[in-house]
Image (spheres, helix red, strand yellow):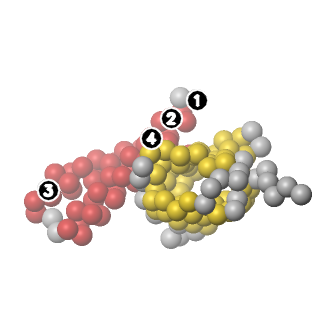
Amino acid sequence: MSTLTNKINLRIITPEKIAYKDKADQITLPTGNGEITVMTNHIPLISTMKHGELVIKNDGKEIPMAVCNGFIEVKKNNVTIMTDIAERVEEIDEQLAKEAKKRAKELLAEKDKMSDVAFADATALLEKSLARIKVARRRKRR
């Protein structure tokens, strides 16, 4: 009897919502050590995630999402991703993301006058904006 299964049970959780809870064939995402693809029967794994594009493939369809810092756990075809943001490409307002990027860069230009907390907040805003813009632009070209 085989223990191999064809699908991954995927949950993507943000502080505000469960962004995705369904089956997947594979997930490609940015980690602290580079991009990885998780497929069925993947070895157990816990890793940090960085901002960028996450792509879920399921039944021949791709679901791109902008994600930010977080964690991934892979265990027996169950994948849990906890991240600051997880937005599908159709949820991203590229113009708002560009404005947020501009605000973040202006704030970071004043880093000598900022507290460590304010600097971390501005850096996080910049990372989120860059992830959103990257996903929105990449998907426009397709």
Kindly identify which residue carries mark 4: 134
Quick one: which residue is furthest to the front in this view?
Answer: 1
**Mark before the other along the chain sequence, 4 or 1:** 4
**Mark before the other along the chain sequence, 4 or 3:** 3
Determine whether label 3 and label 1 are within 8 Å by CB: no
Kindly identify which residue carries mark 3: 110
**Mark before the other along the chain sequence, 3 or 1:** 3
Q: Is residue 141 above or below residue 90?
A: above
Q: Is residue 62 above or below residue 49?
A: above
Kindly identify which residue carries mark 2: 138
- Seen from the viewer's position, the closer of residues 71 and 96 is 71
Determine whether label 4 and label 2 are within 8 Å by CB: yes
* Amino acid type, residue under disc 1 in the picture: Arg
Instruction: Report crowding for label 4: few under 14, some 14 to 19, many 20 or more residues within 10 A (C-alpha).
Output: some
Q: Determine the residue positioned at 71% across, 51% down.
A: 40
Kindly identify which residue carries mark 1: 142
Instruction: Report crowding for label 1: few under 14, some 14 to 19, many 20 or more residues within 10 A (C-alpha).
Output: few
> Dot 1: what SS?
loop
Q: Position of residue 100 (x, y in %)?
A: 34, 52
